[in-house]
Amino acid sequence: MNEVVTLHHGQRETKKLNREAADLARSRWGRDLPVVQVMAAEMPRVVDEAEETLIEAGAPVFTRAGALVRPVSELLPSTSGQLTRVAHLRPLCKASLADILGQTMRFQRWDERRQSFVNMDVPPVVAETMLARQGQWRLPPLAGIITTPTLRADGTLLSEPGYDSETRLFVMLDEGFTLGPLPERPTRADAEAALKLLLDLLSGFPFVGPVDRAVALSGIITSVLRPGLPTAPAHGIRAHTAGTGKSLMVDLFSAIALGRPCPVIAVGKTEEETEKRLGALLLNAVSVISIDNVNGELGGDLLCQMTERPLVRVRKLGTSEAPEIECRSMVFATGNNLVLVGDMTRRTVLCTLDAGVERPETREFDFDPIQRVIEDRGKYVAAALTIARAYRVSGFPKRCVPLGSYGAWSDTVRSALMWLGEADPAASMETMRDEDPELLEIRSLLAHWRDNLAEASFYTASQVIDTACEKDTGGGFLRPEFRDLLLRIAGDGPVVSSKRLGRRLVKMHGRVVGQMRLDLRADEKRGNRFALSKIRVWDGTGEE
């Protein structure tokens, strides 16, 4: 009997503790929270007030890509058992938005019996209506999330946690991160010391030349500054043999910028599949994107856009929506004998590594560069910031000619490195342009056209094919190299397709290569016609 009484007493005590906890929770969440009164036929006003309350409270609710999102973070292992903060975006659903609304404000309804307003749960229709107000939100837009300090466009430091309206970035600093010494007005000597610190990290990598080392330095600095830059070129790392250090170098860049090795994606089997993977990362505002182990050629429309344009359109999976997204992602690509094609040749700087041995993976570094960074990441972040800030404080001396589409990067990173005596990282673009298979095909086609067709005369695609495939009296081809080129460009089995060749000629017309170009004359009856013409070079005196 005593046991039963004790049990009932324990139940009473438990209920008492539950009531006290509930009272405490109500006190905690109810005290000083703004009140939104819910009344019949006034739902638009209720949703307006709820949204305004979120804004005034600084609640972490933002707009991005036609959706409401919130920043989230978690601690994940980096190296040697250490933890680092990883941040990303999550779209809000009805339940998650209702949860934030309930933590930010109180909702009350009119009670007829009491003749007063009483507390109530968050009405589901409020969260549902707010989510549906796409295009009408007053909540702030979000460009991305950073866990490491960076610089704003004016050179000021962005390191205060929370939302920054100027850059539209949300700062979620890693609790274990401490920024190294950063002078307010660093001198050239400060910048040279910072450069030496970064060069020491790169001492074990087998760069082919000074330009390759400059690209690696740009990779470090740009990774830190990328959130504050409108655009930045992709950085490619290539070698001739596996194990030379391509992925290790990208992991080093990521260790400085994010505090951990870099997660990677692979190129899809099709361009569309690759774009889906990149689009998903952009929607989540991923800071660093690494396309790993590219076999052969790399290009694609979305990749070109996200490295050149501050705003891109990305189609959401499973829908026909393609909202605009601010792109603040740093893009890397690695591969053995990596080749950039098309427009990517002028949107990428390239670092080439060559260890000069048969099995480069057996080489030993004097130290582990990633572990060295993780042990004191703050001083390497400060070094990157010091170089950029010192160049600005010095008045942008020896400013190089701005690179098209990358003016801010050129002024902030490229010129700063050249000011300190490093090579021009953009010089690697000319190497890629010379290796571009599309450009090589165009050069070859124009050369064969010039040698076998009359200059300034217009031809249809079929007439070009007839010339290339003309046979001699013995049945052999008079111009076998010209024919082989057309088969590569527009072959359909053993024959050259006039339809494919016509589309290819339309695509390349107007492009100047070696002072030559194809001109197009549209003809609805007989089809498009093309002519090779020489470009006049104006020297300012009236002479060619």
Image (cartoon, rainbow, N blue to C red):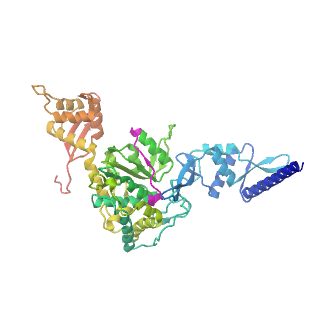
Magenta-drawn segment = 255-272
470 vs 408, left or right, is left
Residue found farthest to the left: 473
36 vs 335, left or right, is right
**Residue at 45% from the left image edge and 43% from the top image edge:** 277
Q: Position of residue 200 (x, y in %)?
A: 36, 66
Whether 38 is among the magenta residues is no
**Residue at 32% from the left image edge and 44% from the top image edge:** 296
Question: How many marks do you count on the picture?
Answer: 0
From this view, report whether residue 39 is shown above or below residue 217. above
Q: Position of residue 46 (x, y in %)?
A: 69, 48
477 vs 506, left or right, is left
Quadrant hosting residue 124: top right
Quadrant hosting residue 204: bottom left
492 vs 189, left or right, is left
Whether 257 is among the magenta residues is yes
Residue placed most toward the observer, 435 or 213: 213
Q: Position of residue 487 (x, y in %)?
A: 24, 33
From this view, report whether residue 422 is shown above or below residue 514. below
**Residue at 57% from the left image edge and 49% from the top image edge:** 69
From this view, report whether residue 381 is shown above or below residue 76. below
Residue placed most toward the observer, 227 or 182: 182
Quadrant hosting residue 298: top left
Residue 416 visible here: yes
Q: Position of residue 288 (x, y in %)?
A: 45, 53
Residue 527 visible here: no
